[in-house]
Image (cartoon, grey):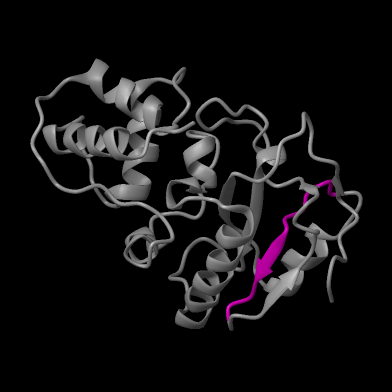
C-alpha cells in the first residue's frame, strides 16, 4: 500500500530533501513497525519501510515532512525532518541486515538521491544527527558497502596527531552536532566508521575525522 501513514505535514521554511536518514525499527517484526508508523496516536512515521525480504513500502510521500528524526541536527540544519527522507529498516537492532534488504536499500537510495540531487555525504544514520540519543542503524549496518556503491562516504586511512580540539572541529565540519561532549561524539563516529573500536581517542580517529571534513564538509 502506498502512503498509508497519516503522520506527516508540510516541510518548513521552504526546505527540500538534502539528506537521507537511515534507521532501524527496533521492533520484533515489520508488521509491528508498520502498525506503529501508521498509528496517528504514535506521531511517528518515515517515508519508506524496508522489510527483511527487500519489500519496499512507501508510507509518506517524499515531498512531505515525515516524523522520523526528532531532536538533533546535521551541519547547519536543525530541522532534520524538513530536510530529509527517512528510511526505516525492519530490524530489532540485534542482528545483521539481510542481503535482500541491503540490496533493496541500495536501489531505493539510488532513486532518492537521483530524484532530489542528494550527494553521498547526505546519507547519514539516525545516530549521526542525534549522538547519545540514538544508536540506529547500529554497528551491524554496512556503511562501507554503501560507500563503495557511491551511496554514502567512507574515510581513507591516514596519519594525524592526537588532537582532541581538531577532532571535534573536523567532526563538526563534516556535520556532527558540535555542542556535545567528546565521548558522545567519539561514540557516534566510531559506531558508523569504526564499529567495535574502544578506548580513548586515537590518532587513527583524528586522521579519519580530518579526511571526512576535508572531502565532505556539510553545508
In this rendering, the answer to whether 34 lies above or below 190 is: below
| Residue 114 falls inside the magenta stretch | no
Residue 25, x across and y down, in percent? 63, 60
Res. 210 in view: yes
- 28 vs 113, left or right, is right
Q: Position of residue 79 (x, y in %)?
A: 68, 31
Asked if one can make out residue 25 in the rendered structure from this viewpoint, the answer is no
Name the side, left or right, on which 77 lies relative to 184.
right
Secondary structure mostly seen in magenta is loop
Label total for image = 0
Is 43 situated left or right of 89 in this image?
Answer: right
Whole-percent x, y for residue 28 in the image: 65, 69
Residue 48 colored in magenta in the image: yes
Residue depicted at x 57% and y 30%:
73
Question: Residues in magenta?
Answer: 42-52
Who's the residue at 67% across and 72% down the image? 29
The residue at the point 32 percent across, 20 percent down is 169
Horizontal side of 10 relative to 86 (left or right) equals right
Residue 209 lies in quadrant: top left
The structure residue drawn at horizontal position 38% and vertical position 55%, both measured from the top left corner, is 139
Identify the image quadrant of residue 210. Answer: top left
Judge whether 181 appears above or below 31 on screen. Answer: above
Residue 15 on image: x %, y %: 71, 36
Position of residue 15 relative to residue 89, above or below, is above
Q: Quadrant of the N terminus?
A: bottom right
Front-most of residues 87 and 197? 87
Amino acid at each position: 500500500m502506498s502512503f498509508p501513514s497519516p503522520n506527516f505535514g508540510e516541510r518548513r521554511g521552504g526546505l527540500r530533501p538534502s539528506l537521507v536518514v537511515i534507521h532501524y525499527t527496533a521492533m520484533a517484526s515489520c508488521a509491528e513497525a508498520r502498525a506503529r508508523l501508521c498509528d496517528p496516536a504514535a506521531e511517528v512515521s518515515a517515508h519508506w519501510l524496508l522489510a527483511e525480504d527487500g519489500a519496499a513500502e512507501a508510507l509518506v510521500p517524499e515531498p512531505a515532512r515525515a516524523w522520523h528524526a526528532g531532536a538533533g541536527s546535521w551541519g547547519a540544519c536543525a530541522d532534520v525532518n524538513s530536510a530529509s527522507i527517512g528510511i526505516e529498516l525492519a530490524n530489532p537492532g540485534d542482528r545483521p541486515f539481510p542481503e535482500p534488504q541491503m540490496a533493496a536499500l541500495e536501489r531505493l537510495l539510488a532513486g532518492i538521491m537521483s530524484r532530489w540531487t542528494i550527494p553521498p555525504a547526505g546519507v547519514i544514520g539516525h545516530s549521526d544527527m542525534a549522538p547519545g540519543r540514538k544508536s540506529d542503524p547500529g554497528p551491524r549496518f554496512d556503511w562501507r558497502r554503501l560507500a563503495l556503491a557511491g551511496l554514502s562516504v567512507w574515510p581513507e586511512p591516514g596519519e594525524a596527531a592526537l588532537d582532541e580540539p581538531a577532532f571535534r572541529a573536523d567532526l563538526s565540519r563534516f556535520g556532527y552536532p558540535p555542542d556535545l561532549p567528546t565521548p558522545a561524539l567519539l561514540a557516534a563516529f566510531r559506531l558508523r566508521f569504526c564499529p567495535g573500536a574502544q578506548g580513548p581517542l586515537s590518532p587513527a580517529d583524528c586522521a579519519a575525522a580530518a579526511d571526512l571534513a576535508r572531502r565532505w564538509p556539510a553545508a
